[in-house]
């Protein structure tokens, strides 16, 4: 079973997301195991400190290397073959084809979610991939980690189940955006459902959808 372990100072941010329908079902069906590791438990001293000021000066605090290192080692003990990913705006831009690749690979993943102004660079010795969800800065790596986990888990065979989703997936081959869709009523505020979709002509419908799907980027 594929393990996803998330190292974070805010494990409670993940409870709603991991317990929500798709992720909950994937866990219930033993497709994935989703766990959090509280970085605070690996903090230094009585106060369980995880951050410190940067050498050379500068604003704000950095996550210290030792608590992060120990948390990653702990996660590796649970899943020795796991790949370690760190969420950072300077990382490799996440996209559908990479989510597909990750969903097909046999090993689990360890996500490091940072806070504050950054990490002590030496943690990179344990990191396999720096990952970004886009060219913007967030206050923590938690939202990017949730986004990436969602995009991988839904592609694991048997997780979505519904044939509709699978059809859209194979049609879109990961890089093509979905075509416009409509449901009842056939007219709303003067806006009509395209005639072809009501025609029952599956060949024409497929052609229309292919034309409507735009290539990403
Ligand atoms: C990742 C992390 C944005 C992304 C992040 C992203 C937390 N913001 N674009 N913020 O995927 C410095 C240390 C910023 C943690 C990091």
Image (cartoon, grey):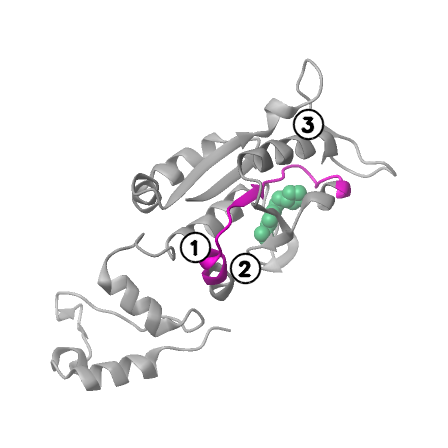
Please check the rendered image and state whether residue 114 is part of the magenta-colored stretch, yes or no. yes
Q: Position of residue 46 (x, y in %)?
A: 68, 13
Residue for point 20% across, 85% down: 203
How many other residues sit within 10 Å of disc 2, few (<14), some (14-19) or many (≥20)?
some
Q: Is mark 3 on a helix, strand or loop?
A: loop
Cβ of mark 3 under 8 A from ligand 1:
no
Residue for point 48% across, 53% down: 106
Cβ of mark 2 under 8 A from ligand 1:
yes
Residue for point 39% across, 44% down: 32
Q: Where is residue 76 in the image (x, y as percent from the top left)?
A: 59, 37
Question: Is 70 located above or below residue 207 in the figure?
Answer: above
Residue 114 as seen in the image, left or right of residue 19: right
Res. 94 mark? 2
Q: What element carries label 2?
A: loop
The residue under label 3 is: 50
Question: Which region shows up in magenta?
Answer: 100-122
What separation in Å lies between label 2 and label 1 (alpha carbons)?
A: 10 Å
The residue under label 1 is: 151
């Amino acid at each position: 079973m594929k393990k996803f372990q998330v190292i974070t100072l805010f494990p409670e941010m993940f409870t709603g997301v991991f317990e929500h329908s798709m992720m909950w079902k994937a866990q219930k069906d033993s497709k994935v195991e989703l766990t959090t590791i509280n970085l605070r438990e690996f903090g230094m001293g009585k106060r369980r400190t995880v951050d410190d000021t940067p050498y050379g000066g500068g604003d704000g605090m950095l996550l210290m290397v030792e608590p992060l290192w120990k948390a990653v080692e702990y996660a590796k003990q649970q899943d020795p073959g796991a790949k370690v990913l760190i969420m950072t705006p300077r990382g490799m831009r996440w996209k559908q084809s990479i989510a597909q690749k990750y969903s097909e690979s046999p090993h689990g993943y360890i996500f490091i979610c940072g806070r504050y102004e950054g990490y002590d660079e030496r943690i990179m010795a344990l990191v396999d991939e720096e990952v970004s969800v886009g060219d913007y800065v967030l206050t923590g790596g938690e939202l990017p980690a949730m986004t990436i986990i969602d995009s991988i888990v839904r592609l694991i065979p048997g997780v979505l189940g519904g044939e509709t989703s699978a059809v859209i997936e194979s049609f879109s081959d990961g890089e093509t955006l979905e075509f416009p869709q409509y449901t009842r009523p056939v007219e709303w505020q003067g806006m009509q459902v395209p005639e072809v979709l009501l025609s029952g002509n599956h060949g024409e419908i497929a052609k229309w959808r292919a034309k409507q799907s735009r290539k990403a980027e």
